[in-house]
Every structure is written in C-alpha cells, then in structure tokens.
Image (cartoon, rainbow, N blue to C red):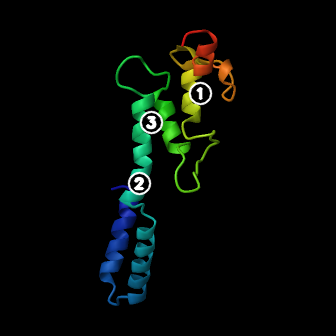
Amino acid sequence: MGPISKKVIDGLQKAKNRKIINFSEIKAANAYAQDLDKTVVSKDNLSKLTDSLSKADDIYLPSYPPKSPHTQSYFTYWGFFDLCAGIKKESFMKYGKNKHFWNEYIFEGFVNYQADMIMLAGFPDIPLSLPHSEASQRERGEI
C-alpha cells in the first residue's frame, strides 16, 4: 500500500471511530459542493466553443488531400489558448483581427516544410507579401 492510500484509509478509520457527527462540517461541505457546481460550464455555453473548434477543424485540418500546413499539435494549441471565447472574445494568447487570423496566415504564408517545422513567408498584415493570399495570386495573374 502506497503513502497516499495509507493516509486515506487512516482518515476513514478515524472518521469511522468518531462517536459525534459535526453537522457544521457537513453543511460546509455541501456549500462547497454547490459553489463548485456553479463553476461547471453548461452544455449550451460549451457548444459555442466546440462548434467554432469543429468548423475550424473542417477548414484547416481536412482529412483528405491536399495536406494542410497546420499540424495537429499547432491546431490543438490554437484551440486551447487562442480560440476566442465569450462575449468579450477572451483568449490566452494574442489574437488577430478575427479568430482565424493566425490560421489564415499559416495557409497564405506557407512556403515549404520539413519534418520538424513549416516555413512561412510574408507579414500577416500585408496581403501582397503572403505567397498564397488572394491579393498576391491576383498580382501574379493566377486568379
């Protein structure tokens, strides 16, 4: 038996041997449980976030060719820390003009890759500097 399980069992044995029940402890535990329950995100609120993530997954990580320049690790990181959520569009990271700003930069600035990195060109806020931007393709006469 490990040290943690030993402490748990000792605590249970002490509680079992007590003759007096302290109702104030039970009330305090109940109040604490209710406070914790208030912190749980509702299904409706969570669906706003998961819907955005699911739509972005379909756009930026297709399961068919052509292969996306986004890696699964980047996309997971983006979903956890940069996907804007809530009324105030809160994010843990710096975000651009919209929630897909950095995803679009990776798509439009993609030049090449190797096993451990992708290579980008251009500046995110200067469309003509990005090789795959609509403005850049129009300038080259491709569209």
Q: What is the C-alpha distance between the residues marked 2 and 1?
A: 27 Å
Q: Is residue 131 visible?
A: no
In the rendered image, which quarter contains the C terminus? top right
Query: Relative to 94, does residue 109 appear above or below in the rendering?
Result: above
- The x and y percentages for residue 36 are 44, 69
Viewer-side residue, 110 vs 115: 110
Query: Relative to 13, does residue 96 appear above or below in the rendering?
Result: above
Q: Callout 1, which amino acid?
A: Tyr
- Local packing at callout 1 (Cα closer than 10 Å; few below 14, some 14-19, many 20+) is many
Disc 3, SS: helix
Disc 2, SS: helix
Q: Earlier in the sequence, mark 2 or mark 1?
A: 2
Which residue corresponds to mark 2?
Answer: 46
Which residue corresponds to mark 3?
Answer: 56
Res 27 → quadrant: bottom left
Viewed as shown, does residue 129 lie left or right of 4? right
